[in-house]
Image (cartoon, rainbow, N blue to C red):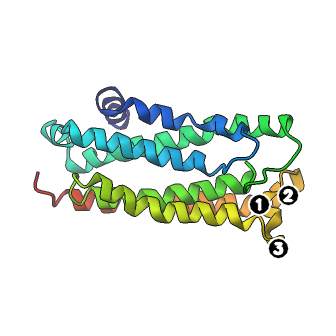
């Protein structure tokens, strides 16, 4: 069932720009750049995708299929989940390549290190929960739902980029083996927050969509 839902979403409902914004990992090779933008671009891609879904009445079409409403939500939720995991996986080789190519630290903000990915998962979790639970309240107000999710997610990204400039928090910017081992708790917390947030996002979104009169 899950594979069929994902196949339907990708083949029939996904906007091409979702793929474009998912493949932003190479941005980690830009010498002076706020690397959390890799995650923000992924959020934009998912917004464009749901906007495209609304314009094509895909959600209404999905409800006409032999699917439960919770399964309609699951399909959109899966696209969000998979696109974000692909964003992270594609960016990792470029994070390692950056260490090979550049010896100077990123002057703008956080390096592409273990802490970076932990914070990235927190950015995703924050956005996903607000965006999808708001969207499935009506399945029409995509722009408003996007702004509600984007603002706090962007604030988290800005805090992360600025934090590494404080002397007491420079360890968050380390790319050494010892430094990144110290950052592991941030990654673990990020993973846990993401898992809990995604579980809550699906349950609340499904409950809200079950009450929508299409």
Disc 3 designates what residue?
168
Element under disc 2: helix
Whether residue 39 sits left or right of residue 33 in the image: it is left
Q: Within 10 angstroms of label 3, few (less than 14), some, or many (20 or more) residues? A: few
Extreme residue in the top direction: 11
Which label was assigned to residue 179? 2
Any part of residue 211 in sight: yes
Whether residue 211 sits left or right of residue 184 in the image: it is left
Disc 1 designates what residue?
183
Q: Residue at x 89, y 42 (%)?
A: 103
Q: Position of residue 157 (x, y in %)?
A: 59, 60
Q: Residue at x 36, y 34 (%)?
A: 6
Q: Earlier in the sequence, mark 3 or mark 2?
A: 3
Whether residue 66 sits left or right of residue 168 in the image: it is left
Answer whether labels 2 and 1 touch (C-beta < 8 Å): yes
**CA–CA distance in space, label 3 to label 1:** 14 Å
Q: Position of residue 70 (x, y in %)?
A: 25, 51
Any part of residue 200 in sight: no
Q: Within 10 angstroms of label 1, few (less than 14), some, or many (20 or more) residues? A: many
């Amino acid at each position: 069932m899950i594979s069929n839902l994902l196949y339907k979403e990708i083949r029939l409902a996904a906007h091409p720009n979702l793929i474009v914004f998912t493949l932003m990992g190479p941005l980690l090779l830009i010498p002076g750049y706020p690397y959390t933008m890799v995650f923000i671009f992924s959020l934009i891609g998912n917004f464009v995708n749901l906007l495209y879904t609304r314009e094509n009445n895909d959600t209404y079409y999905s409800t006409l299929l032999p699917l439960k409403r919770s399964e309609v939500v699951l399909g959109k939720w899966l696209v969000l989940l998979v696109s974000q995991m692909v964003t992270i996986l594609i960016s990792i080789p470029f994070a390692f390549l950056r260490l090979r190519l550049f010896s100077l630290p990123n002057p703008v903000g956080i390096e592409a290190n273990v802490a970076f990915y932990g914070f990235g998962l927190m950015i995703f979790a924050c956005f996903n929960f607000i965006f999808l639970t708001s969207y499935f309240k009506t399945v029409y107000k995509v722009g408003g739902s996007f702004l509600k999710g984007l603002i706090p997610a962007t604030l988290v990204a800005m805090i992360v980029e600025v934090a590494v400039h404080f002397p007491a928090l420079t360890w968050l910017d380390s790319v050494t083996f010892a430094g990144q081992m110290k950052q592991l708790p941030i990654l673990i917390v990020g993973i846990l927050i993401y898992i809990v947030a995604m579980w809550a996002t699906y349950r609340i979104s499904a409950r809200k969509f079950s009450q929508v009169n299409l």
